[in-house]
Image: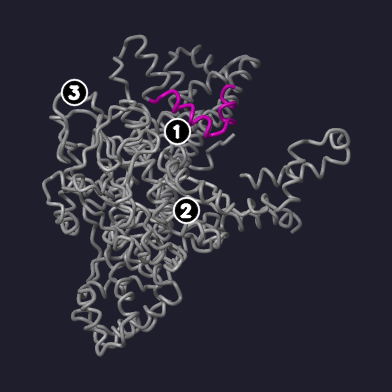
Amino acid sequence: MILNRSGRFDLGLLVRAPGSERWCGRPNPAALLLLLALLTGGRPLALAESLTMVSWGGSYARACEKAYYEPFTSQTGIEVRLEDYNGGLAQIRAQVETGNVYWDVVDMEMADAVRACDEGLLEPIHPGDLAPGPDGTPAEQDFFSGSLTECGVGTLFYSTIYAYNLEKFPEAKPSTIGDFFDLEKFPGRRGMRRTPHVNLEFALMADGVPVERVYAMLDTQEGLDRAFRKLDSIKDHIVWWEAGAQPPQMLADGEVAMTTAYNGRIFNAQVLENQPFAIVWDGQVLDMGQLVIVSGSPNLEAARKFLSFATTVRSMVAVGRYISYSPARQSGTALISTHLETGVNMKPHMPTTPENVTRGLHDDWEWWSDHIDEMNLRFIAWLLR
Amino acid sequence: MRSAALVLPLAAFIAVTFVAPLVVMLGRSVHDPLVADALPETLGLLRSWDGERIPPESVFEAMAGELLKARQEKSLGRIATRVNRVQAGLRSALLRSVRKLRGAPRPDSWREAMIAIDPKWGQTRTWHAIRRAGERFTLRHYLHALDLDQAPGGGIVRQPPDLRIYLPLLSRTLGVSLGITLLCLLLGYPIAYLIANAPPNRANLLLLLVLVPFWTSLLVRTTSWIVLLQTQGVINDLLAAVGLIGDDQRISMIYNMTGTVVAMTHVLLPFMVLPLYSVMRTIPPLYMSAAASLGASFLQAFRRVYWPQTLPGVAAGSLLVFILAIGYYITPALVGGQSGQLISNMVAYHMQQSLNWGLAAALGGVLLGGVFCLYLVFNRLVGVDRMRLG
């Protein structure tokens, strides 16, 4: 943005200057400043270096912006341009296959990151670039196992939970994942993300399948039928969402009585907007966010620098001071502190805090990268019925 | 000769922008050389495989070698995706095997090594799937587009009920298009009649009212419907304010089939009115008076004198609206929600999301074939030479 603006401005000055009165009489102060900056040390030239970071928008993107995009820019002078997306590989695939890549770094779901890597859409990571832990532990040991992949670096744990509006249920309160599917005890519309991912897991857990058997069940025809039958029981009451910023909005508008959501979005609505929302941790599906670099990124050097900056413990912990997502490094767990703007203690709100994972499921990215296309088709077929 | 040269630029333009893409896309629906090019040796050996027992060591060795080579050439991911489309679950089997084989020393038996990594290598089903993914020319996509599949041993079976998508969608698309055509005819016929028989300056005004929406951007018109129909929208607000419905009983009129039908009818209405108008304008009003003077009632005169003369316009308008509706994409995508999606939205899904272009092309091919058949039937029943487009 800045580059464009300053670039265009500069051009305007040159073209208009000879005939312009202002040039002879009073020079435009902004133009003078720019000229001065150009002559002295080339700060604006450094600003000209930039990269495009693609993330999930809303309060999460804002948290990352405060926690490490802005510090990165002020430290290196590399501008971070922010774009939003809702997951998936379609846009990246289109960019890489047409050779017209304009995204540099992308914040991805684990299953997508692995799939994209296998398809050659991402740059391999150099583990040597990653900063060691604060006590000098090498990066590869500091990260939780599984969070470093060939093309991606884990940044944080987030979970999909369900939340409800306290005002809708003044007496009995939903407390288990089964309650989400119980329309008799807790009437009202439900919000769910328009994808089979996570919803099938919720359905099976609600139907009484133990956490450790969920993916084994999904591998069988009976398991799938069971999951879709469970979803059937609330189908007519579901309102579908796509962007992570929608569910808190839907809860606040009263469009739904409860909704699945990313835990951090609900947390932010609770503390920043004083919304009467409550999170049910029972049956939460825990996943990890990954940062990846798109293959053929036009600003590869800047992107690598950014990636090492973003995956330091300091950056991860800083994100956790704006939104309730916990660090992907072991050294980060002890550093979780308070919410920066309100002083709320973050520990009880983190998805990885032991009390919150008593019945939690780890998202099986490998199962999903194998089955996402087939599940999408089944899901569409189910929606059509 | 000279006149042929005059249309040459147009012919070249159509060839480049219409015929060529059509041929390329339809080609994609039956031709997919990716796997065949990457695994030539394996597929060659599989040709002499009996299909009953696990293939011999030589097949495993060729497969491992070619997969490792594909990994070096960075095409492994695409191959795995293709094979996974034939049998879900093989993607990770392929990738995991290559990951493990890459670091390990050359095993004594590739067969045992690979089966140890993933038991799927020991199932004949897997090898049938690889053989099928390796077909250079295949009707697989057309089978899928018709909710059919090839059984592992050959023979064609229907997809299991929870995977049948396209036939129900296709019949829904045909039904909705037919419904919209009828609605357009019901709404458009009186309008066209009014315009054709009004005094010139009022006719011009009415014609303008038909044309202005026609010239307005499709997106603007579609979003206007969203503003009007949504649960917190103008119509619901009005109904709630008047007290016809309670505030919590607001009607969902958009993001479902109602939204699709309403918005599409509005968008396509001019395509019905204009051909009708052009035909009605040429019918002298005296015919109706003549019929009346011979003692026919208005209805009788309309049925036996007026209606038959407008048939060429009715046919043209209906065909136009129907064919446009059957391939309509943007309006259902914006206002259709879940239940208002049509077959074109599935084509878009495979083009943009799942990136299964072969299947998208096959769906397009089925649609094209369907429309062509309908056109032939129509020609037989009505006769295209009787049609008047304007």
Question: Mark 2 touching mark 3, by CB under 8 A?
Answer: no
Q: Position of residue A192 (x, y in %)?
A: 29, 39
The answer to whether residue A128 shows anywhere in this view is yes
Q: CA distance from mark 1 to mark 3?
A: 44 Å
SS at circle 1: helix
What residue is disc 3 on?
A: A170
Given residues A355 and B183, the one toward you in this image is A355
Q: Earlier in the sequence, mark 2 or mark 3?
A: 2
Residue type pointed to by label 1: Met
Residue A243 seen in render: no
Q: Say if labels 2 and 3 share a chain.
A: yes
Residue under numbered circle 1:
B264
Quadrant of the drawing holding the N terminus of chain A = top right
Task: Determine the residue located farthest toward the bottom in the rendered image.
Answer: B108
Depth check, mark 2 against mark 1: the one in front is 2
Question: Hey, which residue is sitting farthest front in the picture?
Answer: A135
